[in-house]
Amino acid sequence: MLIRVYYEDTDCGGIVYHSSYFNFCERARSEMFFQKGLSPVLPNGHFVAKKIEADYILSAKLGDELEVLTELLEIRAASFVLLQTIFKGNQKIFELKITLAYITFEGRPQKIVSDVKELIESLFCS
Amino acid sequence: MLIRVYYEDTDCGGIVYHSSYFNFCERARSEMFFQKGLSPVLPNGHFVAKKIEADYILSAKLGDELEVLTELLEIRAASFVLLQTIFKGNQKIFELKITLAYITFEGRPQKIVSDVKELIESLFCS
Amino acid sequence: MLIRVYYEDTDCGGIVYHSSYFNFCERARSEMFFQKGLSPVLPNGHFVAKKIEADYILSAKLGDELEVLTELLEIRAASFVLLQTIFKGNQKIFELKITLAYITFEGRPQKIVSDVKELIESLFCS
Amino acid sequence: MLIRVYYEDTDCGGIVYHSSYFNFCERARSEMFFQKGLSPVLPNGHFVAKKIEADYILSAKLGDELEVLTELLEIRAASFVLLQTIFKGNQKIFELKITLAYITFEGRPQKIVSDVKELIESLFCS
């Protein structure tokens, strides 16, 4: 997943605004569904961020081309954990460990049933 | 409606990003509902932007305190027109004329019935 | 210029937030510089929005693939006018007429000198 | 620091977009400078996010009024750590531990000298 940095992603400090990296990582997650003709909104529920750990290593600026790599770390009963790394060229500039919970459309946590588990594994392990 | 400019509203040009002014104006519109204990999501529908004309007069920057003034220009059969002006101190810096259409939750235009008309008039004319 | 709609571009009305379309158009403008190895920040100045006229024709939603087409309408002494149209498939969903002023890094309007004029023409007319 | 949730903060999942909480916390940090007539851009440098740990406890939605509380946890040689907690009424809905590095305008880490240390303590400890 390649991401170009545009004006909207930067702030008056001259570099990418700190929360924009979370948007870039979310694009990469959703795009994995879209690329297979699927939606991150599943028939019986969807995913929300539950826990985030992020490290800012180097900054990015207007016009930079970034690459987001996504790796599945763990699937639990009702959530899963991804490691997402953003590179500028071959330099790692940002790293995110994010726990995503599977919830109903009413917002309640729900068990990751086997077909959802298989979907997550097929999207994020290949 | 007072708006403070934060980092997220600026870009690497050092000033407020051009589309952030539309967000500021939207906050002012929604806040008029919230201040009366209401929601901009009405029981039978809500409002979407249909047409925009905007003039950028002066720029704003991090930390500026802006004021948004909102005036009702016209109510039509299925839409209404607002004039929203942003001031920094007593200098006008941005002006927006926005046409908002009243639509159903399925996205179809619908007639502005009399109680919705009265609501719009009471919110935006006082 | 192809744009995918992600969660960040939508709002709780279920469709793309009205100001996100301006971001999409800005990406298309900047990308034309980046594609030629250039930056929209020129050696002696850059561009800011001066005037906007926009029509919302149809809405877009999560996962949609949009295309932004950009056409140069006019170059004036210190500004130029673009027509940017967003399509979903072969349906026009949004149209923007935007006047961009050429300003110094101190924020003052400046004349579009001949090499800047040629650059604008080469980027937006091909 | 009170924050109202507007359309721009939500996504098509119907709740506040996950990265908007970081914007809310940044507003609270900057506002502490602005309230004292200061800017988060100091004469010799400014602050950037270095590390983030965040927990999403409950979701927020359009129109909610949130409160951000900010507490200084630690000042190190070139960075400091804040705990920022977001409440909806008396329910904690989000918690952020953020490490902010003090950098030069060229982007290099720099020592937090004594007057900057005193400023941080005076802003975030009262």
Image (cartoon, coloured by chain):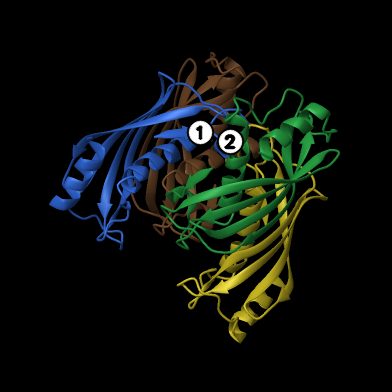
Chain colours: A brown, B green, C yellow, D blue
- Tell me the mark number nearer the camera, choosing from 1 and 2: 2
Regarding mark 1 in the picture, which secondary structure is present there? strand
> Which image quarter holds the C terminus of chain B?
top right
Write down the residue under mark 1. Answer: D4
Q: Is residue B7 visible?
A: yes
Image disc number at residue B31: 2
Left or right: A124, with B85 as reference point: left
Q: Position of residue D39 (x, y in %)?
A: 33, 53
Residue B104 lies, with reference to residue B27, above or below; the image says above
Most extreme residue toward the left, as rendered? Answer: D114
Which three-letter amino acid code belongs to the residue tagged 2? Glu
Q: Position of residue C59 (x, y in %)?
A: 75, 42
- Circle 2 packing at 10 Å, graded few (<14), some (14-19), many (20+), is many
- The chain ID associated with circle 1 is D
Residue C10 lies, with reference to residue C94, above or below; the image says above
Task: Say whether marks 1 and 2 touch (CB < 8 Å).
Answer: yes
Q: Position of residue D10 (x, y in %)?
A: 57, 34
Left or right: B103, with A88 as reference point: right
